């Protein structure tokens, strides 16, 4: 049976604003299926975003949705979650939004281990502004502001999240949309800060400039150039170095921020 | 008017032997992802939109539906495959 | 006023006033000279089931209180100049999305890091014009510790009723000064809450103004699923760039202030027979002005006085009345001349306007003002 996306979509908002071949829609659909899989109540779910292509996602879906300022989704979401910890809070952000202008909020949300699920739509570029390099643009790649190749080095979203203290960390791709859906669902169920590095594609402002082929070529690239962390164990170090690892990198149990704060409330009320 | 109604009015439905592929041309941006990923070459692009050319070859793998970024294609089959 | 008497610092009075007004969320970042507001609420908020969070930066603090307010919690942040500069973008977000919240700026000296432990009144124009784009601005400027308590309550009330951020401008002097104040009994001061919808959720249009210019606001999680965006939006809350929708919406945001002056405007206007000199002063400078007026009268110089308690929107009418009576208006302020421009703007040349300005980290003394009074009388 076809999946009934209509149940979660706001009427009359499609077609969305994303370019032909942009894979953001694949991530959005994975998030919707993950929410369905977990069975979240639409009234009790808040989806928060910042600014950029990915951040336009909440407008299409029928939840409590909050499209904030550039980079600040996690900061707004922290206020939402702490003000009512019974709400389910999901953040969506592009790589520039999440990790450059929003980098400080990103690491601190991870550090607090607040129960928010952050899905990074990681397409290695600032798409909405026309293809400037982002914190995940690989070294040497072309962007509208790196006409001679990118002198910067990229963040590894998974390493960054784990270093900062997130307790659920995974990486999926838009080629592997069903495992991605499962990771997002697990991230939502996980009690604590969850980061899902969703590798996706921007054929318009990144692929074309770097001659990465068609939208489909870019999606198929993930098939050949990623490997699950379990399967990677069977590869030689040289083989593994050429691949991007996917899968669930961390799933730890650690006291969650709002639960810890509830203890403070209980203590203060008793005082 | 609800989207569901709006969508139904704008859909192009191909049906054969209990299998149904629904295309919403207004949502389709002709990116060809579905065409390229379909293992059975069921789909084509005609007039910049997805077109169901060989429904009889469809094996209901849902690769097209899951990876269509534009919500433009839905596959309903004989129920052999579960959703996603 | 009946109630409990306490010996409070201005910053503590602000925090206590916030609790009295029903504040249940504080998001902040440490900055001198405002930290006592945060410290006080870190102790007291959890006792009433509220939440205190120290965020990673000033921007996040501002964002967090908007998020909490969207869930229905009255929310506060406190900062000073450098922090205020960082919060401005999100204050604009609260303006256009019409999310109530209160921002306290305990003003200190200088641009940049300036004089962190010295007083200033240099952020008064920032309170009006700080965030980019046209936006409604409401700023209250109390002049005593008791008034900080009362004006904090009023800041929440106005913010809730009009669905717009309200800035409370205090300064290092009154923020750190201790005075005896009375915390009123519960119910003695009116507490206002934001309008909330009573229509069925499926009929809810978050920016529907058919029943008034302040649309009801649903709490996230209450069953009214709506979209909040900092983009210009239509009645449904979704982005639009249609000129026919954008202009009236922006004008409505401003009208929320101009059509509700009765609940926003507040000032003292003291007149004396035969006064040819007037003073317009606010915040801690108004305390020195008061003393200077007393000293001048002892010397036989009667002086009129306007003390705006609501600084924005500025009380034009009494200032025009003053200008029609006196020859000279003295505007003492701890900056190099900011509200003086507003005084000049609204009196349109009806009187001469002179400033008394200090930015050296010391307060303006009564003698500084008296000297100017003598000079112009």
Image (cartoon, rainbow, N blue to C red):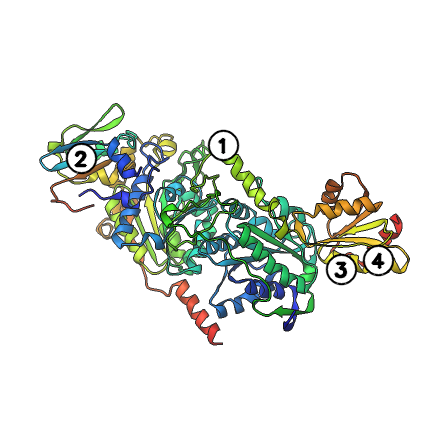
Question: Which residue is label 3 attached to?
Answer: C287
Examine the rendered structure and indicate whether residue C37 appears above or below residue C342. Answer: below
- Say if mark 4 contacts mark 1, CB within 8 Å: no
| B79 vs A195, nearest the viewer | B79
Left or right? Give the position of C291 relative to C266.
right
Question: Which residue is label 2 attached to?
Answer: B21
What residue is at 67 percent from the left and 54 percent from the top? Answer: C266
Left or right? Give the position of A154 relative to A219.
right
Is the residue marked by circle 3 packed among few (<14), some (14-19), or many (20+) residues within 10 Å? Answer: some
**Residue C117 percent coordinates (x, y):** 68, 59
Left or right? Give the position of C64 relative to A247.
right
Instruction: Look at the image and tell me in which quarter the N terminus of chain C lies.
Output: bottom right
**Residue A10 percent coordinates (x, y):** 34, 42
What residue is at 64 percent from the left and 49 percent from the top? Answer: C112
Q: Nearer the viewer, mark 4 or mark 1?
A: 1
| Labels 4 and 2 share a subunit | no
Residue ranking furthest to the front = C211
Q: To which quarter of the image does residue C177 belong?
A: bottom right
Question: Which residue is label 4 attached to?
Answer: C367
- Say if mark 3 contacts mark 2, CB within 8 Å: no
Question: Please, what secondary structure does the residue beneath circle 4 have?
Answer: helix
First in residue order: circle 4 vs circle 1 = 1
Question: Which residue is label 1 attached to?
Answer: C244
Is the residue marked by circle 1 packed among few (<14), some (14-19), or many (20+) residues within 10 Å? Answer: few
| Labels 4 and 1 share a subunit | yes
First in residue order: circle 3 vs circle 4 = 3
Residue ranking furthest to the left = B17
- Say if mark 2 contacts mark 1, CB within 8 Å: no
**Residue C344 percent coordinates (x, y):** 75, 42
Q: Rounded to the nearest whole Å, what is the CA distance between mark 3 and mark 4?
A: 12 Å
| Labels 2 and 1 share a subunit | no
* Chain hosting mark 3: C
């Amino acid at each position: 049976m076809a999946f009934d996306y209509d149940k979660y979509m706001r009427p009359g908002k499609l077609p969305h604003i994303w370019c032909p071949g942009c894979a953001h829609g694949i991530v959005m659909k994975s998030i919707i299926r993950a929410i369905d899989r977990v069975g979240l109540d639409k009234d009790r779910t808040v989806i928060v975003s910042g600014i950029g292509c990915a951040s336009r996602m909440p407008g299409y879906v029928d939840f409590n949705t909050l499209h904030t300022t550039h980079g600040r989704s996690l900061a707004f979401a922290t206020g939402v979650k702490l003000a009512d910890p019974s709400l389910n809070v999901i953040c969506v952000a592009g790589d520039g939004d999440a990790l450059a202008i929003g980098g400080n909020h990103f690491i601190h949300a991870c550090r607090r281990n607040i129960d928010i699920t952050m899905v990074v739509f990681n397409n290695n570029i600032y798409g909405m502004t026309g293809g400037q390099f982002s914190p995940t643009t690989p070294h040497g790649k072309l962007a509208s502001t790196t006409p001679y190749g990118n002198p910067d080095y990229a963040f590894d979203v998974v390493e960054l999240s784990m270093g900062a203290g997130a307790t659920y960390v995974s990486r999926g791709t838009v080629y592997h949309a069903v495992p991605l859906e499962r990771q997002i669902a697990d991230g939502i169920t996980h009690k604590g800060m969850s980061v899902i590095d969703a590798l996706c594609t921007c054929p318009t402002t990144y692929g074309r400039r770097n001659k990465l082929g068609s939208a489909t070529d870019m999606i198929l690239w993930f098939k050949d150039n990623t490997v699950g962390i379990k399967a990677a164990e069977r590869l030689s170090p040289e083989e593994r170095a050429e691949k991007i690892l996917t899968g669930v990198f961390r799933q730890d149990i650690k006291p969650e921020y709002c639960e810890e704060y509830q203890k403070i409330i209980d203590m203060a009320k008793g005082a | 008017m609800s989207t569901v109604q709006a969508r139904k009015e704008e859909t192009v439905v191909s049906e054969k032997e209990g299998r149904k592929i629904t295309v919403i041309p207004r949502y389709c941006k002709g990116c060809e992802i579905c065409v390229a990923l379909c293992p059975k070459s069921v789909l084509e692009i005609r007039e910049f939109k997805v077109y169901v050319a060989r429904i009889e070859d469809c094996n209901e793998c849902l690769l097209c539906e899951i990876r269509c970024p534009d919500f433009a294609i839905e596959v309903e089959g004989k129920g052999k495959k579960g959703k996603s | 006023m009946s109630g409990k008497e306490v010996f409070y610092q201005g910053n503590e009075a602000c925090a206590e006033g916030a609790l009295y007004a029903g504040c249940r969320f504080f998001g902040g970042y440490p900055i001198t000279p405002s930290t006592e507001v945060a410290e006080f609420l870190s102790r007291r908020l959890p006792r009433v089931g509220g939440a205190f969070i120290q965020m990673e930066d000033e921007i996040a603090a501002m964002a967090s209180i908007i998020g909490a307010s969207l869930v229905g919690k009255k929310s506060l942040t406190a900062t000073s100049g450098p922090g205020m500069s960082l919060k401005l973008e999100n204050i604009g977000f609260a303006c256009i999305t019409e999310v109530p919240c209160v921002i306290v700026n305990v003003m200190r000296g200088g641009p940049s890091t300036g004089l962190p432990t010295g007083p200033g009144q240099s952020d008064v124009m920032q309170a009006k014009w700080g965030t980019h784009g046209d936006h409604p601005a409401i700023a209250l400027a109390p002049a005593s510790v008791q008034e900080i308590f009362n004006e904090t309550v009023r800041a929440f009330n106005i913010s809730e009723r009009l669905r717009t951020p309200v800035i409370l401008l205090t300064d290092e002097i009154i923020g750190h000064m201790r005075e005896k104040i009375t915390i009123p009994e519960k119910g003695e001061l009116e507490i206002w809450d934001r309008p909330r919808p009573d229509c069925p959720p499926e009929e809810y249009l978050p920016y529907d103004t058919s029943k008034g210019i302040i649309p009801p606001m649903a709490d996230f999680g209450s069953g009214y699923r709506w979209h909040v965006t900092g983009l210009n939006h239509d009645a449904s809350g979704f982005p639009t760039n249609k000129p026919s929708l954008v202009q009236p919406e922006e004008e409505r945001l401003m009208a929320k202030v101009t059509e509700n002056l009765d609940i926003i405007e507040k000032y003292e206007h003291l007149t004396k027979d035969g006064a040819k000199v007037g003073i317009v002063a606010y915040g801690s400078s108004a305390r020195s002005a008061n003393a200077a007026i007393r000293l001048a009268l002892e010397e036989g110089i009667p002086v009129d006085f306007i003390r705006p308690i609501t600084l924005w929107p500025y009380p034009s009418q009494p200032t025009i009345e003053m200008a029609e009576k006196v020859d000279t208006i003295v505007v003492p302020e701890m900056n190099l001349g900011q509200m003086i421009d507003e005084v000049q703007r609204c009196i349109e040349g009806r009187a001469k306007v002179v400033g008394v300005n200090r930015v050296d980290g010391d307060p303006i003394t009564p003698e500084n003002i008296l000297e100017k009074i003598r000079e112009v009388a």
